[in-house]
Amino acid sequence: MSSVKNVIKDNYNMMLLKDYLRSAIKEAGFSHVEISKTPTGTRVVLHVTRPGIVIGRKGTGIRELTETLEKRFGLKSPQIAVNEISQPELTASVMCNRLAQLIERGTAFRRATMWTLQQIMNAGAMGVQITVSGKLRGDRSSFEKHSLGVLPRAGHSASIIVDEDTTPIPTPMGYIGVRIRIARKERYIPEFELKGKKETKEEREIRLAKEESERIARTESEQVKLDQEKIEQMDLMEEVEEKLK
């Protein structure tokens, strides 16, 4: 019985740790954490979109986080490593947080959902599904499910290529739940390989330069603010087009 209690306690502490990291390093685009025990202590690997925010100036952020993990969560000699996420738009947890911030800032949930869907597909996803549930329009709870592309629902393929995460969003009407499932092409092994046109070196350099020029936000809040401005511009353009008709 003691071993069962230890397992439950470890899982509970892990849940508390993830909740803390999700809020403490929110601006760094926290995705997930990996913890493993070593002979010299505990190795903690943080997967984020912006490692510089976690590290801080001259390593002050890492030192403060190390002290917190050791004193508050009882990790023995934590050794923190920060891993940068190369494609945040293909990470379900990051996109859940961005969608949550858009809705918290006042963007209509359906508009924010469709924008998030398009951002994920533009990043090269094979398929995506976003489910929003809660008191969306009135006192009664309801849910909406939006999908694009090809997304395996069950089986071995789904367990390998689909990344999934959920997050609650506090609103004046109550909490809204968001669930995002993303199918990634690079994890898919097709039965028959279709040979198409390969990307040239010049085309790849142009594409990478364009991607770098678009990523000017330093924090996740700045990224969400840019997304919200783009959504508002699209709404304004649609209103102008309707008036001109």
Image (cartoon, helix red, strand yellow):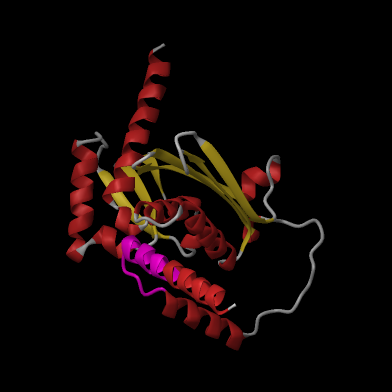
Q: What is the tally of numbered marks visible in this picture?
A: 0
Q: Is residue 28 above or below residue 197?
A: above
Asked where in the image residue 194 lies, by quadrant, the reply is: bottom right
The reply, left or right, for residue 49 in relation to residue 124 is left
Residue pictured at 19% horizontal, 65% vertical: 57
Looking at the rendering, in which quadrant would you find the C terminus?
A: bottom right
Outermost residue toward the right in this view: 192
In the image, farthest residue toward the bottom = 202
* In-image side of 100 versus 24 (left or right): right
Give the dominant element type of the magenta stretch: helix, strand or loop. Answer: helix
The magenta segment is 215-230
Is 80 situated left or right of 231 in this image? Answer: left
Q: Is residue 72 magenta?
A: no
Q: Position of residue 89 (x, y in %)?
A: 50, 61
> Is 3 placed above or below 217 here?
above
Q: Is residue 38 visible?
A: no
Q: Quadrant of residue 172?
A: top left
x and y, in percent, of residue 164 in the image: 54, 46
